[in-house]
Amino acid sequence: MGSGEVMKEGVLEKRSEGLLQLWKKKHCVLTGEGLLLLRPKQYLQQPGHQEPQPGHREPQPGHREPQPGHREPQPGHREPCSGGKELRFGDMKTVDGVERKGKYMYFTVVMADKRELDFRCPQDAGWNALITLGMVQYQNRRAMEAVHSSRQKLAQRGIGTGIHNPA
């Protein structure tokens, strides 16, 4: 899976870090590199997104009308935006504390710096599983890149990488 490919896009609720710890809706985009969190207002101001006009029929999911002068990204890819919070898989440690209560699934994303970010979503949304899957795929890609890089370095030095079994 490519790093810019959108795995899931939709709304998640994040618990605020303030004194009241209120649940705030975030428009989220999950890619092969991490999770982008946008306030719904920021999402509506994104290039390529238009609010529906009165009497306007909603297009099919994933379809957006291009704006004049705007270069449309390739399907399944998302251009980076400013103003959002990006949680990169390289900075994530684990998805923890998955719990079902009522109509919501609650889970915590634990970051490498030990910060804990609490989220909730409808039980059938599957955000926790997709974030975990994305994190594992990211780590596997990085491990494969490291193996490939070390093999290239060994080959440049003229050292074979195969296992030799002298008879």
Image: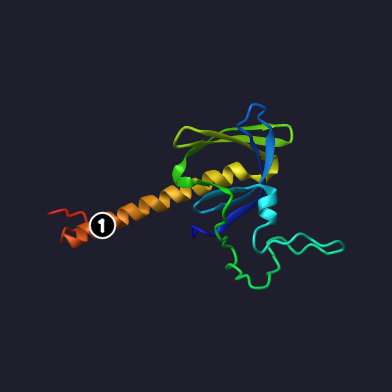
Q: Quadrant of the C terminus?
A: bottom left
* Residue 21 x/y as whole percent: 65, 30
Q: Residue at x 26, y 54 (%)?
A: 150
Asked if residue 116 is positioned above or below residue 79 in the image, the reply reads above
Asked if residue 29 is positioned above or below residue 99 in the image, the reply reads below
Circle 1 packing at 10 Å, graded few (<14), some (14-19), many (20+), is some
Q: Residue at x 71, y 60 (%)?
A: 61
* Residue 53 x/y as whole percent: 82, 62
Say which element carries label 1.
helix
Q: Amino acid at mark 1?
A: Arg
Task: Report the front residue among 17 and 153.
Answer: 17
User: What is the residue that sits farthest to the bottom in this orientation?
Assistant: 69
Q: In the figure, residue 103 lies in which quadrant?
A: top right
Asked if residue 138 is positioned above or below residue 62 in the image, the reply reads above
Residue at numbered disc 1: 151
Q: In the figure, residue 99 lies in which quadrant?
A: top right
* Residue 35 x/y as whole percent: 55, 48
